[in-house]
Structures are given as structure tokens and as C-alpha cells.
Image (spheres, helix red, strand yellow):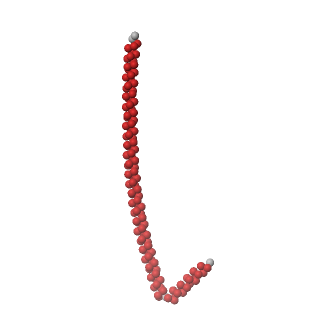
Amino acid sequence: MNDAPDEAAKSAAEDDAAARLKKDLTAVKNDIAHLSQQIADAVNALAAVAQNQGRRSLRQARANVDQAVSGASDRAGAVAGAAQDAASSVADALAEAIQERPVAAVALAMGVGFLVGVAWRR
């Protein structure tokens, strides 16, 4: 008969242990859920930071491209102006040479025309 109180005490201890284990498992589940939420929040925050950084980099790249295009346009305008000045000075020099030596200019024009005609035939 001594076994009955021992078994009752043993059963009560096992019930206590099972209740503590159940309570601990519930706490672990809650902690895991909380950690999962914290990880999700951290990932969302990192995504937002990466998106902002990407937008900033895109704006910077656009500004660099705009600046490069503007610089190229300015240089192209300067080259076009220089070419126009050179063409104008060549035209002026040619007009002056024709006025000073009209016979030589006509002979030169005829020679160039003859060479173009010979080259065109071939």
C-alpha cells in the first residue's frame, strides 16, 4: 500500500513536468513568432533602404548623362562654329584668288572638270 502514495506523487510530478514543458513549448513558439516578425521587419527596412539607394544612384546617373550630353553638345557647337569659320575663310580666299587671277581660275576649273569626267567614265 505504500506504492499508491508514491505513484500518486510520481504522477503529480509528471503532470507538473508536462505542464511546465507545455508552457515552455508555448513560450518557445511565441519567441519564434516574435523573432520571425523582427526578421521580416528588418528585411523590409533593408529593402526600403536599398530602394532609396537605387533611386539616388539612378538620379545621379541621369545627372551625369545629362551633363555629358550637354558637354558634348557644347563641343559639337564649337566644332561646327570652327568649321563654319574655316569654310568662310576658304570661300573668302577662293573669291580673292578668282578676282586676282580670273584666267588661272577658269583654267583650274576646266582641269578639275576634265579629271572628274575621266574618273567618272571608269
> Which residue of the protein is positioned furthest toward the bottom in this rendering?
103
Residue 108 in the image: state x and y as whole percent.
53, 85
Residue 118 in the image: state x and y as whole percent.
60, 81
**Residue at image point 38% right, 16% down:** 8
The relative height of residue 108 versus residue 5 in the rendered view (above or below) is below
**Residue at image point 55% right, 82% down:** 112
Closer to the camera, 65 or 31? Answer: 31
The relative height of residue 99 versus residue 29 in the rendered view (above or below) is below
Count of picture labels: 0
The relative height of residue 63 versus residue 118 in the rendered view (above or below) is above
Closer to the camera, 28 or 101? Answer: 28
Residue 4 in the image: state x and y as whole percent.
39, 13
Instruction: Give the quadrant of the C terminus.
Output: bottom right
> Which residue of the protein is positioned furthest toward the top in this rendering?
1
**Residue at image point 39% right, 27% down:** 21
Residue 36 in the image: state x and y as whole percent.
39, 39
> Which residue of the protein is positioned furthest toward the right in this rendering?
122
Closer to the camera, 58 or 99? Answer: 58
Instruction: Give the quadrant of the N terminus.
Output: top left
The relative height of residue 68 versus residue 105 in the rendered view (above or below) is above
Query: To which quarter of the image does residue 66 belong?
Result: bottom left
**Residue at image point 39% right, 36% down:** 33
Query: To which quarter of the image does residue 72 belong?
Result: bottom left
